[in-house]
Image: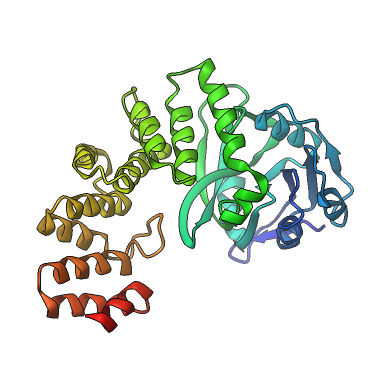
Amino acid sequence: MCSFILAFSGKSVVAMELSLCMIVKNEEELLEQSLHQLCPYVQEIIVVDTGSTDRTKEIALNFTQQVYDFPWVDDFAAARNFSLEKASHEWVLVMDADEVITEFKTESLRTLLSVEDLIVGRIKLINIIEGKRINERISRLFKRKLFHYEGAIHEQLVSNDGRPYSTVPLEITVEHRGYTSAVIQRTQKTARNIALLKRELEKCPTDPYGLYQLGKTYYLDKNYGEAAAYFKQALALPLNFHLEYVENLVETYGYALINCESYAETLGLINYEKYYAGSIDYQFLIGLVSMNNGRFSQAIERFLRCIGDKEGKIEGINSYLPKYNIAVIYECLGYRAEAISYYQKCGNYPAALKRLREI
């Protein structure tokens, strides 16, 4: 593998060598594509296998000789930290086998090279869940000697001296395909994750992040009742509403309640307006809350706030999705012309095209 060069404004040229650190188990279906896409951007590939019984190690050896065995001890942080120990370069990029690079702009790494050491680069992760593309930012690029992981599951990056660290968004985009139904069934992720999360919660029953992750796991398994119950427990605890996971907690709790048809209970989510008024993801959710509670004027107002250039977590949340919901409201109220107008504004959104054919 070759290191890449960062050139800025035709002036200085800086070499940045990256070690890729990845832990795997039975990933033969996805690993080759993931490593192939990453090769141009890293000089060293570290693959830590936690007990594969398929061709995973064989595939990994086609890309690197640095394939290590690590006995699985029900602790993702332990495996992650082992992979960091095996890296030889200062900077590491942490990836999973079910993630594929779709964009990697090296110029975005300039900030990492020009500021203090305690900084972490956050990549854009696109989760593909039942055909929907949901975006989030995650911390993945850092100096390995300054950080370690903690947490048996959904491990968190922590500085070695306990100090808070700064983050910077990178123009690196990754598609995460591990939430597709086929992959979840093949790896039995849900059952494994629930067992690990419940074990961790036994140690600290009032850990809001653990409760959030357990609720999220149930949500992905479409067990919306259990998901809502754990989300509700987490929201009853003292929280820092500026943390990204807390915003996700509020939003996913709302969608869990909607899926449970607990519409009256969703009205309580309006109380979080003071924290998330500027979030189009929150505005869209409150639009759905208002819509499902018969507050149609308020719903239209919320959906209109979503339309624009601001990026949200869900694809289409700033364009065709709010327009479609406005059209549905107009159609339900008997305003046929207005409904048709908004369906037409949805472009090629299949649900809107279907309504235009039927209306």
Residue sitting nearer the eye, 20 or 29: 29
Left or right, 349 with respect to 205, comes to: left
* Quadrant into which the N terminus falls: bottom right
Examine the rendered structure and indicate whether residue 4 appears above or below residue 255: below
Quadrant including the C terminus:
bottom left
Q: Is residue 344 visible?
A: no
Seen at 36% across and 40% down, the residue is 247
Residue at x-position 53% and y-position 45%? 138
Seen in the picture, residue 238 relative to 282 is either above or below; the reply is above
Rendered image quadrant of residue 337: bottom left
Residue 284 lies, with reference to residue 113, above or below; the image says: below
**Front position in the image: 182 or 238:** 182
Place of residue 347 in the rendered image (x, y in percent of width and height, measured from the top left): 34, 79
Q: Position of residue 139 (x, y in %)?
A: 56, 42
Looking at the image, which residue sits at the far bottom? 357
Point out residue 109 in the picture as x, y percentages from the top left corner.
Answer: 60, 53
Residue 269 shown left or right of residue 112 in the figure: left
The answer to whether residue 153 shows anywhere in this view is yes
Residue 47 position, x and y percent, is 79, 44
